[in-house]
Image: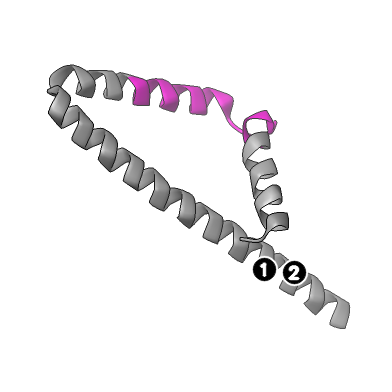
Amino acid sequence: MDTYLHCLYQYALDDLLLDARLNLIDYSRRSARQDLAWNALTESLTSEQMNLVEDYILACNRVRSLEDELLFEKAVALGKWMVRQESVR
């Protein structure tokens, strides 16, 4: 991802929670449920198991981040293509 796209992507991420269209109630409920599930998991695992889970989560988050960036790049490329198509008409 080039510098411009990275900046645009970061702006979109940083601004996400401030977006008035985001259903904050639903987000809050899901976030709280996630916290409860995480707490239940951490209480039931040994420290060695917890380290394995944390390594797995880190690996998953890195893959998800790359997927999100790729999706963002594709969406921007599609938007550029659509603008070019409109200007040809």
How far across and down, in percent of the image, does residue 78 sit?
Answer: 67, 69
Q: Is residue 29 visible?
A: yes
Q: Is residue 21 magenta?
A: yes
How far across and down, in percent of the image, does residue 53 sit?
Answer: 23, 35
Residue type, label 2: Lys
Picture quarter containing residue 12? top right
**66 displayed left or right of 52:** right
Residue at the image point whose x is 71% and y is 50% from the top: 8
Badge 1: how crowded within 10 Å, few (<14), some, or many (20+)? few
Mark 2 near mark 1, Cβ–Cβ under 8 Å?
A: yes
Q: Which mark is residue 80?
A: 2
Q: Which mark is residue 77?
A: 1
Q: State the CA–CA distance, disc 2 to disc 1.
A: 5 Å
Residue type, label 1: Ala
Span colored in magenta? 16-35
Residue at the image point whose x is 53% and y is 61% from the top: 70
How far across and down, in percent of the image, does residue 87 sit?
Answer: 87, 77
